Image: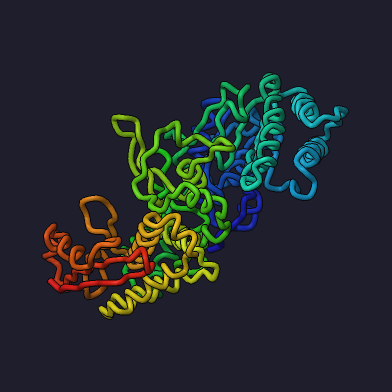
Amino acid sequence: MKYPIGIQDFRKLREGGFVYVDKTKHIHQLLQGSKYFFLSRPRRFGKSLLLSTIRELYEGQQHLFKGLWIHEHWEWETAKKKVVWLKFSSQGMKTLGLIPSLNEMIRKEAERLNVHLTEQAYDLRFRELLAKAAAGSRVVLLIDEYDKPIIDYLDEQSTAEEHREVLKSFYSVLKDSDPHLELVFITGVSAFSEVSIFSDLNNLYNLTLTPQSRHLNGISQEELEHYFEQPLQQIAQQQGLSYEGLLQKVRLWYNGYNWTQNERVYNPFSLLSFLHAREFHNFWFETGTPTFLLKTARQYGYYDFSKKQASRLMLSEFELGQLHPLPILFQTGYLTLKSGPDRTGLYTLDYPNLEVKAAFEERLLNLYAEDKHLESGIRISRLLYALEAQDMEAVVTIINATFASIPYEHWQRENEHFFHALLHLTFSLLGAYIQSEVHSGQGRCDAIVETEAHLYAFEFKLDHSAEEALEQIIDRDYLGPYADRSKARVAVGVNFSSRSKQIDDWRIREL
């Protein structure tokens, strides 16, 4: 079985004999409705492949769809249209600049469609391209990664704002071009408000959080088991797991994305990469390190992203100059919907899966600790082994090493904040690696960590006493809900000194 990892061209995928999860029925249903579509999805989620599929449909490439649902349901002759496809991912913005890149993109499309252009300004050339390409019949306009000229420059705000104004003028052409357009489909990562970019497109239908979009991108559990049962059976055998056991592990690592309060889907890039490599790894995260996102989270003092709440309006915010971590992380795929809306209209956000949670928290921990050697992952591994051996002295040494990496001036400025951030990230990351239940909230133990033989309850105090922390675990019966477990239950009280910036006392009691 050939896996189309990173292949975004429908023709190349079909002619190359790669496996294709048939989305054509859902595409057909969608195209029977509105005329102007907008869809926001994270990178590597098949947006380009979706537009490539739509292009081949309207260009009448019937042979590419043989064996797929839509082959017998599409009006191949009457639906045929010219297609203008603008792909911002393929433009040399960093070398040419945005406006020259726009002109070059328009020139190439005009040449491909045999259209002669006379206008000089980029927006007028775009309008001319649409008008002349539509001679005799309206055209289909596909715009892929509309926001790339902004997303790529989020850490250069002046450039990003300049690009936004250029794009606003560019896209404003669409309103007056409506008589020439059969269909407009725009995709991107961010959901800039209509005022920011699409102020003139009041008929643009945002699919992002609607039921119509739930099958367009990503791979469902049903699709996974239908299209990939054979390789999954082989991997299960290789790893000494039952088929159901492997499915559960794959779901933990790569499933969990949700935009419609309904079916959760897999990241297709990660899933296909796993099926090819036959090992669990952080495939998606490593294709683009979110330095700007991490810095923004750190700037706002965020470190715990579990069960965060946001309104629908907040989820679609992406305003330059006041970028908030939650909508950015949601739109870019590092957070997803877990539930909602509730009766007040709020949604609950969380990490989609283990792949994203573990990788993001490790890098955020490195950033908080200013660990330039990126040793947080190594420390977490050592912490796990120390807990498995019930070597509490080693546990204390490892935690102290994490705190010791913080520059003195930062600790003085953010004493308590650093304490809580580093502890939360350390134990949350540990919990992700060993799939334990880790809590950090009022009225509950700071951390519950479960290893193969032990179940630990940790309570941390700042400038108090380890005995006080230990008694709190016992008095509030934090380990009570786990009394039916056969594992040893261990209470650990820890006190951290802000003066010495390390653990100065700890108490342990097996219950």
* Quadrant in which residue 469 is drawn: bottom left
Residue 222 visible in the picture: no
**Closer to the camera in the image, 178 or 14:** 178
Coordinates of residue 69 in the picture (x, y in percent): 50, 42
Q: Residue at x 68, y 25 (%)?
A: 172
Q: Residue at x 64, y 38 (%)?
A: 146
Q: Quadrant of the C terminus?
A: bottom left
Coordinates of residue 71 in the picture (x, y in percent): 56, 40
Q: Residue at x 79, y 26 (%)?
A: 124
**Closer to the camera in the image, 203 or 314:** 314
Q: Residue at x 24, y 50 (%)?
A: 442
Q: Is residue 400 left or right of residue 387?
A: right
Q: Residue furthest front?
A: 499
Q: Is residue 42 left or right of residue 224?
A: right
Question: What is the count of numbered marks?
Answer: 0
Coordinates of residue 193 in the picture (x, y in percent): 55, 30
Q: Image height check: is 246 above or below 70?
A: below
Q: Image height check: is 495 above or below 127?
A: below
Q: Image height check: is 392 above or below 433?
A: below
Coordinates of residue 330 in the picture (x, y in percent): 46, 44
Residue 102 visible in the picture: yes
